[in-house]
Image (cartoon, rainbow, N blue to C red):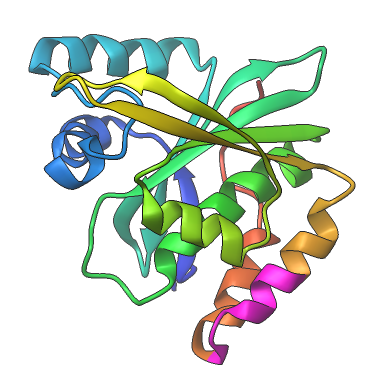
Amino acid sequence: MSQELALRPLLEEDRWRLRDWRNSERVRAVSIDDAEIATDAHSRWFDRVLEQRRDEIFVAQWQGRPVGVVQLEEYDRDGAISSWGCHLGETDVPPGLGATLPLLALAHGFETLGLRRMHAKVLGHNNTMRSIHRRLALPQEGVLRHHLRRGDGTEVDVYLYGVLASEWPELREKAVAMFPSSLSETVRTALTTPVSDTFTL
Protein backbone atom coordinates (compact mmCIF):
# COMPACT_ATOMS: atom_id res chain seq x y z
CA MET A 1 0.00 0.00 0.00
CA SER A 2 1.38 3.40 -0.95
CA GLN A 3 2.04 6.05 1.65
CA GLU A 4 -1.02 8.29 2.03
CA LEU A 5 0.90 11.57 1.62
CA ALA A 6 4.21 11.63 -0.24
CA LEU A 7 6.42 13.46 -2.70
CA ARG A 8 7.75 11.72 -5.77
CA PRO A 9 10.17 12.87 -8.48
CA LEU A 10 8.82 14.40 -11.66
CA LEU A 11 7.99 11.86 -14.38
CA GLU A 12 7.28 12.15 -18.09
CA GLU A 13 3.62 11.43 -17.36
CA ASP A 14 3.45 14.76 -15.50
CA ARG A 15 4.31 16.91 -18.55
CA TRP A 16 0.79 18.09 -19.40
CA ARG A 17 -0.61 17.69 -15.90
CA LEU A 18 1.75 20.40 -14.65
CA ARG A 19 0.81 22.73 -17.49
CA ASP A 20 -2.90 22.26 -16.86
CA TRP A 21 -2.45 22.94 -13.15
CA ARG A 22 -0.24 25.99 -13.69
CA ASN A 23 -2.52 27.49 -16.34
CA SER A 24 -5.65 27.21 -14.23
CA GLU A 25 -7.04 30.63 -13.37
CA ARG A 26 -6.81 29.77 -9.67
CA VAL A 27 -3.05 29.11 -9.78
CA ARG A 28 -2.15 31.85 -12.26
CA ALA A 29 -3.84 34.44 -10.06
CA VAL A 30 -1.33 33.81 -7.27
CA SER A 31 1.78 33.12 -9.37
CA ILE A 32 4.66 35.58 -9.69
CA ASP A 33 4.19 35.42 -13.47
CA ASP A 34 0.45 35.27 -14.18
CA ALA A 35 0.74 34.80 -17.95
CA GLU A 36 -0.67 31.66 -19.49
CA ILE A 37 2.09 29.25 -20.52
CA ALA A 38 2.06 28.13 -24.15
CA THR A 39 2.30 24.47 -25.03
CA ASP A 40 5.69 24.71 -26.78
CA ALA A 41 7.26 26.84 -24.04
CA HIS A 42 6.05 24.47 -21.36
CA SER A 43 7.35 21.42 -23.22
CA ARG A 44 10.81 22.99 -23.64
CA TRP A 45 10.88 23.89 -19.94
CA PHE A 46 9.82 20.38 -18.96
CA ASP A 47 12.55 18.86 -21.16
CA ARG A 48 15.17 21.08 -19.48
CA VAL A 49 13.91 20.18 -16.03
CA LEU A 50 14.13 16.44 -16.72
CA GLU A 51 17.53 16.73 -18.39
CA GLN A 52 19.37 19.23 -16.21
CA ARG A 53 17.84 18.59 -12.78
CA ARG A 54 19.13 21.90 -11.43
CA ASP A 55 15.97 22.40 -9.41
CA GLU A 56 14.04 19.81 -7.50
CA ILE A 57 10.44 19.63 -8.62
CA PHE A 58 8.17 17.03 -7.09
CA VAL A 59 4.61 15.91 -7.46
CA ALA A 60 2.73 15.65 -4.17
CA GLN A 61 0.48 12.60 -4.00
CA TRP A 62 -2.47 11.88 -1.76
CA GLN A 63 -3.41 8.21 -1.53
CA GLY A 64 -1.44 7.59 -4.72
CA ARG A 65 -3.15 10.38 -6.67
CA PRO A 66 -1.17 13.41 -7.95
CA VAL A 67 -2.61 16.53 -6.30
CA GLY A 68 0.06 19.26 -6.31
CA VAL A 69 3.57 20.51 -6.94
CA VAL A 70 6.48 21.26 -4.60
CA GLN A 71 9.53 23.08 -5.98
CA LEU A 72 12.97 23.82 -4.58
CA GLU A 73 14.68 26.40 -6.77
CA GLU A 74 17.50 28.97 -6.72
CA TYR A 75 19.72 26.33 -5.15
CA ASP A 76 23.07 27.65 -3.93
CA ARG A 77 25.34 24.70 -3.17
CA ASP A 78 28.04 26.77 -1.46
CA GLY A 79 25.58 28.76 0.60
CA ALA A 80 23.36 25.72 1.29
CA ILE A 81 20.20 27.71 0.63
CA SER A 82 17.18 27.33 -1.62
CA SER A 83 13.78 28.85 -2.26
CA TRP A 84 10.61 26.82 -2.01
CA GLY A 85 7.29 27.11 -3.80
CA CYS A 86 4.17 24.98 -4.03
CA HIS A 87 0.59 24.82 -5.16
CA LEU A 88 -2.30 22.39 -5.19
CA GLY A 89 -3.29 21.30 -8.65
CA GLU A 90 -6.44 19.56 -7.48
CA THR A 91 -9.02 21.06 -5.14
CA ASP A 92 -11.07 18.01 -4.18
CA VAL A 93 -8.69 17.03 -1.39
CA PRO A 94 -9.06 16.78 2.40
CA PRO A 95 -9.19 20.13 4.25
CA GLY A 96 -5.73 21.17 5.37
CA LEU A 97 -3.85 19.21 2.73
CA GLY A 98 -2.63 22.40 1.05
CA ALA A 99 -0.87 23.39 4.27
CA THR A 100 1.26 20.25 4.09
CA LEU A 101 3.00 21.34 0.88
CA PRO A 102 5.31 24.02 2.39
CA LEU A 103 6.17 21.56 5.16
CA LEU A 104 7.07 18.86 2.63
CA ALA A 105 9.34 21.35 0.86
CA LEU A 106 11.06 22.36 4.09
CA ALA A 107 11.47 18.77 5.25
CA HIS A 108 13.13 17.79 2.00
CA GLY A 109 15.42 20.83 2.01
CA PHE A 110 16.55 20.53 5.60
CA GLU A 111 16.43 16.81 6.27
CA THR A 112 17.45 15.37 2.90
CA LEU A 113 19.57 18.08 1.29
CA GLY A 114 21.03 19.47 4.51
CA LEU A 115 20.28 23.10 3.66
CA ARG A 116 20.92 25.77 6.28
CA ARG A 117 18.27 28.25 5.09
CA MET A 118 15.17 28.25 2.88
CA HIS A 119 13.05 31.15 1.68
CA ALA A 120 9.81 31.83 -0.20
CA LYS A 121 7.77 34.63 -1.78
CA VAL A 122 3.99 34.93 -1.50
CA LEU A 123 1.91 37.55 -3.30
CA GLY A 124 0.03 39.93 -1.05
CA HIS A 125 -3.39 38.95 -2.39
CA ASN A 126 -2.72 35.22 -1.89
CA ASN A 127 -4.60 35.24 1.39
CA THR A 128 -4.85 31.46 1.55
CA MET A 129 -1.09 30.85 1.42
CA ARG A 130 -0.31 33.79 3.68
CA SER A 131 -2.77 32.38 6.21
CA ILE A 132 -1.12 28.96 5.93
CA HIS A 133 2.30 30.50 6.58
CA ARG A 134 0.94 32.30 9.64
CA ARG A 135 -0.71 29.17 11.03
CA LEU A 136 2.48 27.18 10.51
CA ALA A 137 4.45 30.00 12.23
CA LEU A 138 6.86 30.36 9.31
CA PRO A 139 8.84 33.56 9.94
CA GLN A 140 7.92 36.54 7.79
CA GLU A 141 11.07 38.47 6.91
CA GLY A 142 9.64 41.48 5.13
CA VAL A 143 7.34 42.91 2.48
CA LEU A 144 8.35 44.24 -0.93
CA ARG A 145 5.65 46.87 -1.38
CA HIS A 146 4.15 47.31 -4.87
CA HIS A 147 6.94 45.05 -6.09
CA LEU A 148 5.21 43.41 -9.06
CA ARG A 149 3.20 45.02 -11.82
CA ARG A 150 0.63 42.65 -13.30
CA GLY A 151 -0.49 42.55 -16.91
CA ASP A 152 -3.56 44.60 -16.01
CA GLY A 153 -1.40 47.33 -14.46
CA THR A 154 -2.14 46.55 -10.81
CA GLU A 155 0.80 46.60 -8.41
CA VAL A 156 1.23 43.74 -5.97
CA ASP A 157 3.06 43.41 -2.66
CA VAL A 158 5.37 40.42 -2.22
CA TYR A 159 5.72 38.87 1.25
CA LEU A 160 9.04 37.25 2.12
CA TYR A 161 9.38 34.20 4.37
CA GLY A 162 12.46 32.38 5.58
CA VAL A 163 13.32 29.43 7.79
CA LEU A 164 16.69 28.44 9.24
CA ALA A 165 17.72 24.83 9.74
CA SER A 166 18.03 25.51 13.48
CA GLU A 167 14.36 26.61 13.57
CA TRP A 168 13.00 23.69 11.61
CA PRO A 169 12.67 20.94 14.28
CA GLU A 170 10.53 23.10 16.57
CA LEU A 171 8.48 24.48 13.66
CA ARG A 172 7.89 20.95 12.37
CA GLU A 173 6.59 19.66 15.71
CA LYS A 174 4.33 22.65 16.30
CA ALA A 175 2.98 22.44 12.75
CA VAL A 176 2.21 18.73 12.94
CA ALA A 177 0.32 19.28 16.20
CA MET A 178 -1.93 21.83 14.46
CA PHE A 179 -3.41 19.29 12.03
CA PRO A 180 -6.54 17.36 13.00
CA SER A 181 -5.81 13.95 14.50
CA SER A 182 -7.08 12.29 11.33
CA LEU A 183 -4.20 13.89 9.40
CA SER A 184 -1.42 14.63 11.91
CA GLU A 185 0.24 11.19 11.94
CA THR A 186 0.04 11.02 8.16
CA VAL A 187 1.79 14.40 7.97
CA ARG A 188 4.44 13.34 10.50
CA THR A 189 5.19 10.20 8.49
CA ALA A 190 5.45 12.17 5.24
CA LEU A 191 7.83 14.72 6.79
CA THR A 192 10.19 12.02 8.08
CA THR A 193 10.18 9.80 4.98
CA PRO A 194 12.78 10.73 2.31
CA VAL A 195 11.61 11.13 -1.26
CA SER A 196 12.29 7.87 -3.06
CA ASP A 197 14.64 7.86 -6.03
CA THR A 198 15.42 11.53 -5.67
CA PHE A 199 18.43 12.94 -7.50
CA THR A 200 21.13 14.83 -5.62
CA LEU A 201 21.68 18.51 -6.37
Image label count: 0
Q: Residue at x 44, y 73 (%)?
A: 1
Q: Main secondary structure of the magenta part?
A: helix
Check the image and report above or below for 12 versus 133.
above
Q: Can residue 137 be seen from the camera position used here? A: yes
Tell whether position 175 is magenta: yes
Locate residue 119, reporting x and y percent. Answer: 65, 33
Locate residue 103, reporting x and y percent. Answer: 60, 55
Check the image and report above or below for 178 versus 48.
below
Pick the residue in front: 172 or 55: 172
Q: Start and end of the magenta stretch? A: 174-181
Locate residue 10, reporting x and y percent. Answer: 39, 34
Check the image and report above or below for 72 versus 43.
below
Locate residue 12, reporting x and y percent. Answer: 27, 30
Q: Can residue 6 be seen from the camera position used here? A: no
Q: In the picture, residue 189 is in which quadrant?
A: bottom right
Pick the residue in front: 121 or 105: 121
Q: Residue at x 37, y 20 (%)?
A: 148
Check the image and report above or below for 111 versus 158.
below
Pick the residue in front: 24 or 18: 24
